[in-house]
Image (cartoon, rainbow, N blue to C red):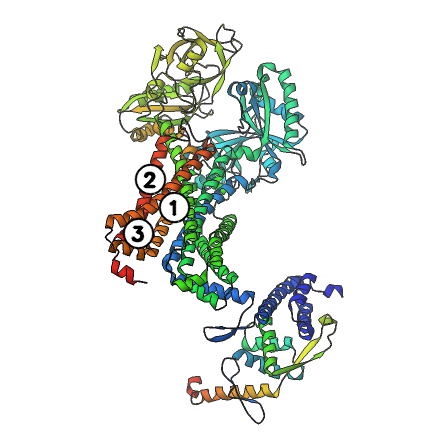
């Protein structure tokens, strides 16, 4: 009959909970009978477990209640003879009592709930974001085996120094990558990708979108399957294959209205009819959200150029292979490649690191810093509520004393106090969820771009769990001190005294708590102040450009329509000429790389010298570029129209290059050359330094070729950044410029439209700006909480000292003297907290080191500003109690007890 | 029970007692089941008549309470394999239980008197 046996564990639970003897046995039998008859049979085990849990738990709770009741005997409460309940019943009683006492003091309750809500809400939001960004596993299947593979320049490292935390990947050349892939044995697969931009013409007109070029196995490697259609196949990669595209979910929704029949349709990508073969899932991010995938098309020349590092690699290690082993193997293979092709691979090696650490990047430490800061705020909130709780306990000494006299145990009283704070924390947590929700949305909208994987972050189960956990934790933290206090109050004295005098020990503890609060708030404020100062310093650095009134935008010419170099250079020449002629335009120019965004470089050296070649920033510019961005010519002559021809042999260089290569010697007329001296160019002019890598990095040696002269490349750039200096508002020119572009080519979109001022502001670092905004808001919150703490303590003291203050007034103390007495209490607390806070901030400023620049931890301006802010806040917090004290009527005060 | 019951001095049976609604349902269902009233049958009959789910725990605890009040008693018979060998309790309503039911019915009838047109 084993098939008719109900689940054992459930039956065991029933035997444990149901009454002993025949009645319990008969209940078991009843359930068994129902179990045997239950249809459908497939569900009967589940049904039995459910029924057993319900029935058993009910009986168990009743038995526990009764057991305790029997031991405790009857009690008389409010004239009614009652059995004192068991654990469960008395807990219920305590919850009800706590609720009643909270409702009776709405001001206290609202203050405590609001404090908890702010603390828990903000902390939940930040921890949720950090969890989503850092700790949640990548959405790709078995993501722990995924690694990022790239080249690493040994020479560049030697020059700049390398820190362990600094993951710097350079791109790989296509032949190097294919050789690595062919020889690697510790990898399940190695695939390549490259960020690229595409002109897509959909239902909403032409649009320039960022996407990925990928090798055919990219999706399989990441375990990303299209939600519609199919993935790329090896054939799609071959030269001459029909062009195909996988659309990103957002692009599919926005440009093609989520058309379910899109697969198989032909759309225009870079002016080429391309077949849509599928749509990617909405969650895919890498680490931003690429709007489409196109397969690589590797053919002829690209398979031989080992010097052109243009693609990036990812790999999936075989199960059980460590990242170190994978790296060791690739390093061995690369060493062979370096020996075989020294001109391209000497001084290079290969880098392998977990994909997650690459996707998180440097924001990881910053986010952890934020968590630390928010936990401090939560702690301040807890201290605040604890302080309120102690004040309440002192206020209720009389009541507590009476209850003790009537037989309430200390444990029970302490439990009551703890319960009260738990209730407050849970209510605060529930309200805090709303705060968390708004904070999260605010964070994502404002800082989504700087937070890794922000697309996956939202108020979800994890956040709810975090919030609930924080609420319980803060309830305990805030309730523990008052609960211990209640346990230790000398309550018999309270009855004798009538409960008006100060309890000295408690007052000291409360003072200490407020000092702690203020110290933490000052620490946060000082940190925020240092970051603010850094940003001010950075904004004052001369970037080497005049950013006022300059518009920047990008145009990419599709190869299908602009096949020859002449067509491309002719397009830009015509466009710049037409824009230049527009009213309101002072100067128009174009460059191959956005200003203030370094990172396009090669190794060059002075011609004819024996120096080793040095990493040099390279750009091509039109003659109008320098006047447009406002960079001055220091020596020599500017570029001329007509020098944009292959072989013109002239370049401009910046001051940094002259200082590094020629010292104080005259540089105009000298030549720069490639590392093998196969090509060289004459320096005709020297321009000012531009802080291409932001204000904190010194300008690097830079070479500017005339656009169209080929420079070190074999062709001309089809994608250019156009800069237009206007006499008025640069954005006002936009419609007219769009019209000019449309007349030249109706399918060309303008992309990355920004003012040079915006670009300059970005160099300060979005991380620094978000850090400043967050730290400043947290510091403000902490100060507010600290002020509330000071206010509560001072107000409480005033109400305790009414009698004493009344005597003082009666004996002739002036209003000013009485207010001064009250304010001096607050100021003393704030001063003590302030000193401690500054010391802590000084000691802890190392955690901010990444964010600071040319600001000392003991920056006098920051200290002065925070001290002033603290002083004003303290005065405000003391103002109301001081006023109340000053207006005290001595007669009433003396009569009141 | 909230109200103070009055007891007849001669037979010791309750008078002017009002049994609660759920307890009445249980007592009546036990009576309807005849001499083989087991908890399962009682529960099914109650559910069929009242049209609502009867919680097992509520039924068992009510039967226990009714037993404490002396309204029902039970005897045990051995259970077969369909019950996994567990005993079965057969409930009967005591004379006291019947008296309490009568008293409750009387109270209801008195309250209904003269209200026939409300019903029809």
Categorize mark 3 by other alpha carbons within 10 Å: few (<14), some (14-19), many (20+).
many
Identify residue for label 3.
A881
Are discs 1 and 2 located on one and the same chain? yes
Residue A646 vertical position relative to residue A739 in the rendered view, above or below? above
Position of residue A335 relative to residue A250, above or below, is: above
Indicate left or right for A436 with A295 as reference.
Answer: left
Marks 1 and 3 sit apart, C-alpha to C-alpha, by 16 Å
Residue A753, can we see it?
no
Residue bearing the label numbered 1 = A786
Question: Closer to the camera: disc 1 or disc 3?
Answer: 3
Q: Is residue A631 left or right of residue A326?
A: left
Chain assignment, label 3: A
For disc 2, the chain is A
Front residue of B7/A249: it is B7
In the image shown, does A699 or A412 lie closer to the viewer?
A: A412
Question: In which image quadrant can residue A854 be found?
Answer: top left
Q: Secondary structure at mark 1?
A: helix
Callout 1: 10 Å neighbours few (<14), some, many (20+)? Answer: many
For the question of whether residue A594 can be seen, the reply is yes
Labels 2, 3: one chain: yes
The percent coordinates of residue A697 (x first, y second) are 43, 23
Look at mark 2 in the image and give the residue it sits on. Answer: A869
């Amino acid at each position: 009959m084993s098939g008719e046996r109900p689940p054992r564990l459930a039956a065991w639970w029933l035997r444990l909970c149901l009454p002993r003897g025949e009645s319990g046995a008969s209940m078991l039998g009843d359930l068994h009978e129902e179990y045997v008859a239950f249809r459908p049979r497939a569900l009967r085990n589940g049904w039995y477990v459910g029924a057993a849990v319900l029935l058993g738990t009910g009986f168990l709770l009743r038995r526990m209640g009764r057991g305790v009741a029997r031991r405790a005997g009857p009690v008389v409460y409010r004239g009614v003879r009652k059995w004192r309940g068991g654990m469960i019943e008395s807990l219920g009683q305590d919850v009800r009592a706590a609720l009643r006492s909270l409702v009776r003091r709405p001001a206290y309750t609202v203050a405590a709930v609001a404090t908890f809500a702010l603390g828990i809400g903000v902390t939940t939001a930040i921890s949720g974001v950090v969890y989503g960004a850092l700790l949640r596993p990548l959405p790709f299947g078995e993501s722990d085996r995924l690694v990022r593979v790239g080249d690493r320049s040994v020479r560049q490292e030697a020059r700049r120094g390398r820190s362990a935390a600094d993951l710097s990947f350079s791109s790989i050349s296509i032949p190097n990558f294919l050789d690595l892939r062919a020889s690697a044995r510790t990898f399940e697969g190695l695939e390549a990708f490259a960020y690229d931009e595409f002109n897509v013409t959909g239902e909403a007109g032409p649009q320039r979108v960022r996407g990925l070029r990928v090798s055919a196995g990219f999706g399989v490697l990441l375990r990303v399957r299209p939600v519609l259609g199919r993935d790329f196949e090896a054939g799609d990669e071959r030269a001459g294959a029909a062009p195909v595209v996988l659309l990103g979910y957002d692009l599919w929704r926005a440009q093609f209205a989520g058309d379910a029949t899109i697969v198989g349709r032909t759309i225009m990508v870079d002016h080429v009819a391309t077949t849509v073969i599928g749509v990617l899932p909405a969650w895919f991010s890498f680490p931003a959200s690429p709007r489409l995938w196109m397969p690589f098309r590797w053919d002829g020349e690209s398979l031989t150029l080992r010097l052109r590092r243009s693609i990036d690699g990812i790999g999936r290690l075989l199960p059980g292979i460590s990242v170190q082993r994978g790296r060791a193997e690739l390093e061995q293979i690369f060493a062979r490649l370096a020996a075989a092709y020294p001109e391209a691979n000497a001084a290079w090696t290969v880098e392998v690191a977990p994909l997650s650490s690459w996707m998180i990047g440097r924001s990881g430490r910053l986010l952890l810093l934020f968590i630390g800061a928010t936990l401090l705020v939560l702690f301040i909130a807890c201290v605040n509520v604890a302080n309120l709780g102690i004040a309440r306990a002192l206020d209720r000494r009389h009541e507590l004393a009476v209850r003790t006299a009537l037989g309430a145990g200390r444990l029970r009283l302490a439990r009551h106090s703890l319960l009260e704070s738990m209730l407050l924390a849970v209510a605060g947590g529930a309200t805090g969820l709303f705060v968390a929700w708004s904070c999260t949305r605010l964070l994502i909208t404002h800082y989504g771009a700087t937070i890794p994987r922000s697309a996956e972050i939202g108020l979800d189960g994890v956040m709810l769990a975090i919030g609930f956990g924080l609420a319980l934790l803060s309830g305990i933290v805030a309730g523990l001190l008052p609960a211990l206090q209640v346990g230790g109050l000398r309550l018999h004295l309270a009855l004798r005294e009538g409960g008006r005098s100060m309890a000295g020990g408690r007052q000291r503890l409360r003072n200490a708590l407020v000092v702690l609060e203020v110290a933490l708030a000052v620490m946060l404020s000082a940190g925020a102040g240092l970051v603010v100062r850094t940003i001010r310093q950075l904004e004052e650095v001369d970037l080497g450009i005049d950013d006022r009134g300059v518009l920047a935008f990008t145009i990419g010419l599709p190869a299908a329509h602009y096949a020859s170099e002449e067509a491309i250079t002719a397009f830009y020449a015509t466009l710049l000429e037409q824009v230049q002629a527009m009213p309101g335009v002072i100067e128009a120019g174009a460059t191959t790389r956005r200003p203030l965004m370094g990172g396009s470089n090669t190794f060059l050296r002075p011609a004819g010298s024996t120096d080793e070649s040095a990493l040099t920033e390279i750009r091509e510019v039109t003659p109008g570029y320098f006047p447009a961005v406002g960079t001055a010519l220091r020596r020599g002559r500017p570029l001329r129209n007509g020098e944009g021809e292959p072989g013109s042999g002239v370049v401009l260089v910046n001051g940094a290059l002259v200082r590094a290569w020629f010292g104080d010697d005259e540089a105009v007329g000298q030549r720069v050359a490639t590392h093998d001296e196969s090509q060289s160019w004459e320096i005709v002019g020297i321009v000012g330094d531009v802080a291409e890598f932001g204000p904190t990095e010194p300008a690097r040696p830079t070479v500017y070729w005339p656009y169209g002269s080929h420079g070190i490349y074999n062709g001309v750039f089809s994608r250019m950044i156009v800069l237009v200096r206007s006499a008025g508002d640069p954005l006002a020119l936009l419609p007219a410029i769009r019209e000019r572009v449309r007349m030249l080519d109706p399918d060309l979109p303008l992309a990355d439209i920004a003012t040079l001022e915006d670009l300059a502001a970005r160099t300060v670092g979005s991380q620094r700006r978000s850090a400043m905004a967050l730290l400043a808001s947290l510091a403000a919150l902490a100060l507010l909480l600290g002020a509330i703490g000071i206010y509560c303590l001072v107000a409480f003291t005033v109400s305790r000292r009414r009698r004493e203050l009344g005597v003082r007034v009666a004996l002739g103390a002036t209003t000013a003297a009485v207010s001064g007495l009250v304010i001096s209490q607050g100021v003393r607390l704030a001063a003590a907290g302030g000193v401690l806070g500054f010391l802590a901030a000084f000691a802890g400023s190392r955690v901010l080191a990444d964010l600071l620049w040319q600001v000392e931890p003991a920056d006098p301006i920051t200290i002065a500003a925070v001290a002033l802010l603290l002083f004003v806040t303290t005065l405000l917090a003391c103002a109301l109690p001081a006023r109340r004290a000053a207006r005290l009527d001595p007669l009433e005060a003396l009569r009141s007890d | 029970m909230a109200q103070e019951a009055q007891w007849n001095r001669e037979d010791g049976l309750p008078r002017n007692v009002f049994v609660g609604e759920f307890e009445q349902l249980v007592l009546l269902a036990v009576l309807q089941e005849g001499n083989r009233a087991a908890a399962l049958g009682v529960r099914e009959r109650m559910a069929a008549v009242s049209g609502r789910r009867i919680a097992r725990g509520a039924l068992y605890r009510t039967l226990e309470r009714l037993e404490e009040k002396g309204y029902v008693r039970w005897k045990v018979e051995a259970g077969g394999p369909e019950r996994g060998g567990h005993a079965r309790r057969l409930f009967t309503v005591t004379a006291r239980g019947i008296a309490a039911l009568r008293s409750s019915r009387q109270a209801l009838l008195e309250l209904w008197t003269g209200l026939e047109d409300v019903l029809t």
